[in-house]
Amino acid sequence: MRMNQGVEWSVHVLLSLAWLDDDEPVSTASLAASYELPVAYLNKQLQALVRAGLLRSLPGARGGFVLARRPEDITLMDVVAAIEGREFAFQCTEIRQHGMGQEAPQSAFRRKCAVDSAMQHAELQWRKALAAKTIADIRAEADSHAPSAARLARKAYGRA
Amino acid sequence: MRMNQGVEWSVHVLLSLAWLDDDEPVSTASLAASYELPVAYLNKQLQALVRAGLLRSLPGARGGFVLARRPEDITLMDVVAAIEGREFAFQCTEIRQHGMGQEAPQSAFRRKCAVDSAMQHAELQWRKALAAKTIADIRAEADSHAPSAARLARKAYGRA
């Protein structure tokens, strides 16, 4: 089970925009060039981030994308949900009711399947951790490892 | 991102064998029939469980599968790892080093990428929860919801 690569791209794009710390839009072409990503496929991810309310798209020749919220208000869960959707990875198809299950009384199926409950509980721990980490947290950590990153992002996007 | 359906099937198969609580093998055909699953594709999952050391395969006309460990010693993490592999769902491709990253000093990349760290930390919470839940736990919960299930499993597999 592999997460869409668009999640990695999206977090890095949001991080780059957080480094700019201004309201000037950055074009898809600039964002793609700054990480050597394919423009069309990156654009598909950016549109998903717009639909999810994480980016704003500004039209026009000098248009592009800006953060729609502060980096403190964008979590990794928001990004994963925008790109991968909100469905659980484990999808119960109620096989307990098939085959031998057909002989069980209906009361046996009143409660959610114990397999589904356990799998969902585990995924919720994952989601909770994703929801606890913001783009601002990641920016702070990246800044401490790579103090030059913010400056390079500003340069790549034509800021002074 | 969707988990292989073989995970659901596998947990139910392990649960069924746990209900039998004996050392008599159950054939792929019986296991498939008891949940109305396709024999060939179920067999592929069962072979993966054998390779992972969760099932033992006994040869011969009366052969089939038995649990290789006690239900207390088989966790959901074991099952997910057997079917999905042990790779993280989030795979970092180090895009931080591409494009504008090429201008950064090598020291900027000495520590693991902050995006990868955060994603991996979150997935570890998921894995920890999966590793904390055993087939015996699920059997106990299923028994409390559906007291007839163990009897139906024994009947489906020809036990008295």
Image: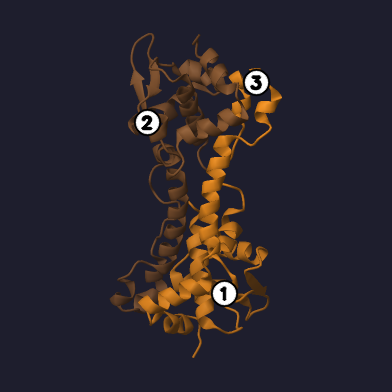
Chain colours: A orange, B brown
Measured Cα–Cα span from mark 2 to mark 3? 28 Å
Report which quarter residue B101 is drawn in.
bottom left
Measured Cα–Cα span from mark 1 to mark 3? 51 Å
Q: Amino acid at mark 3?
A: Ala
Query: Residue A62, percent across and down?
Result: 62, 81
Residue at 56% of width from left, 61% of height from top? A77
Q: Which residue is mark 3?
A: A104
Q: Amino acid at mark 1?
A: Glu
Q: Which mark is residue A72?
A: 1
Q: Chain of mark 2?
A: B
Q: Secondary structure at mark 3?
A: loop
Q: Which residue is mark 2?
A: B54
Neighbour tally class for label 1: few under 14, some 14-19, many 20 plus, Cα within 10 Å: some
Mark nearest the camera among 2 and 3 is 3
Residue at 65% of width from left, 73% of height from top? A56
Neighbour tally class for label 3: few under 14, some 14-19, many 20 plus, Cα within 10 Å: some
Mark nearest the camera among 1 and 3 is 3
Q: Chain of mark 3?
A: A
Neighbour tally class for label 2: few under 14, some 14-19, many 20 plus, Cα within 10 Å: many
Query: Residue A41, percent across and down?
Result: 54, 60
Measured Cα–Cα span from mark 2 to mark 1? 44 Å
Residue A20 seen = yes
Q: Secondary structure at mark 1?
A: helix
Q: Nearer the viewer, residue A69 or B127?
A: B127
Q: Chain of mark 1?
A: A
